[in-house]
Image: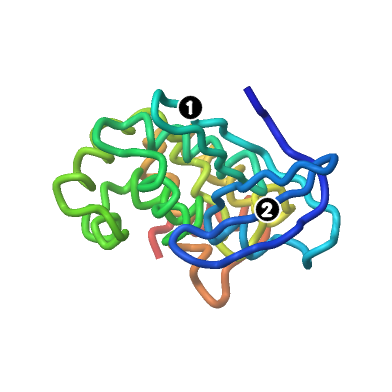
Amino acid sequence: MIAFLSGTLFEKTVGAPSTAILDVGGVGYEVFVPLSTFETLPRDGQPCRLLVHDYVREDQHVLFGFAAPDERDLFLLLQGVSGIGPKTALSALSAMTVRALKTALVDGDVKTIAKIPGLGKRTAERLIVELKGKIDPLDAAASPAEKKDSPLSQAYRDAALALVQLGQTEEAAAKAVREIAARPDAPTETPAIVRLALSGR
């Protein structure tokens, strides 16, 4: 099985789905990618590396590529749900960021998930039910404007963990810090975030 491809970007095409063709040692590999990955691709002719899910069935052999591990991990979780194929999972990752999709799944936000092309209310409900417990609510706790491994993102995750230790559920803690992160005057230090969350203001 192919885990990743590293070579030169030969061509990229935006569409439904978007594709990238990587030249690896003189062999062109066509890889289907979500829009989040497509936006990170270099110019044609530049070095490119993609994590890959090698999808093999009796009647097809398709490569799906991702810029980051969390994209590929969520893709695999989604297509593990009954009735969700790889192209639908790719469509979900193109419609929403990983963090936004995880947040919607954790919060049970059927309305938001149902807006994804190829999904409806019933499928959205099934996704929420089948993925309950498989997604860490605290993954969505950081400020949406920050990268997952940034100091500010870590401050919000630490605040959510502190709230859990103080007796709140993971879902409630994650929701509280997300609401604080969305404020224009959001604090940047963990203690201040915790105090604000506990005050309920």
Q: Position of 7 compared to 66: left or right?
A: right
Displayed quadrant of residue 71: top right
Residue at the location (69% across, 57% down)? 152
Q: Is residue 97 above or below residue 67?
A: below
Q: Position of residue 179 (x, y in %)?
A: 43, 62
Q: Position of residue 184 (x, y in %)?
A: 54, 77
**One can see residue 175 in this view:** no
Q: Dot 2 corresponds to which residue?
A: 21
Of 91 and 130, nearer the camera is 91
Residue at the location (30% across, 39% down)? 84
The secondary element bearing badge 2 is classed as strand
N-terminal of the pair, mark 2 or mark 1, is: 2
Q: Is residue 136 above or below residue 179?
A: above
Which labelled disc corresponds to residue 56?
Answer: 1
Residue at the location (67% across, 39% down)? 51
Q: Position of 155 compared to 139: left or right?
A: right
Residue at the location (63% across, 39% down)? 69
Q: Position of residue 132 (x, y in %)?
A: 31, 32
- Crowdedness of circle 1 by 10 Å Cα count: few (<14), some, many (20+)? few
Of 38 and 184, nearer the camera is 38
Determine the residue located farthest toward the bottom in the rendered image.
Answer: 184
Of 55 and 111, nearer the camera is 55
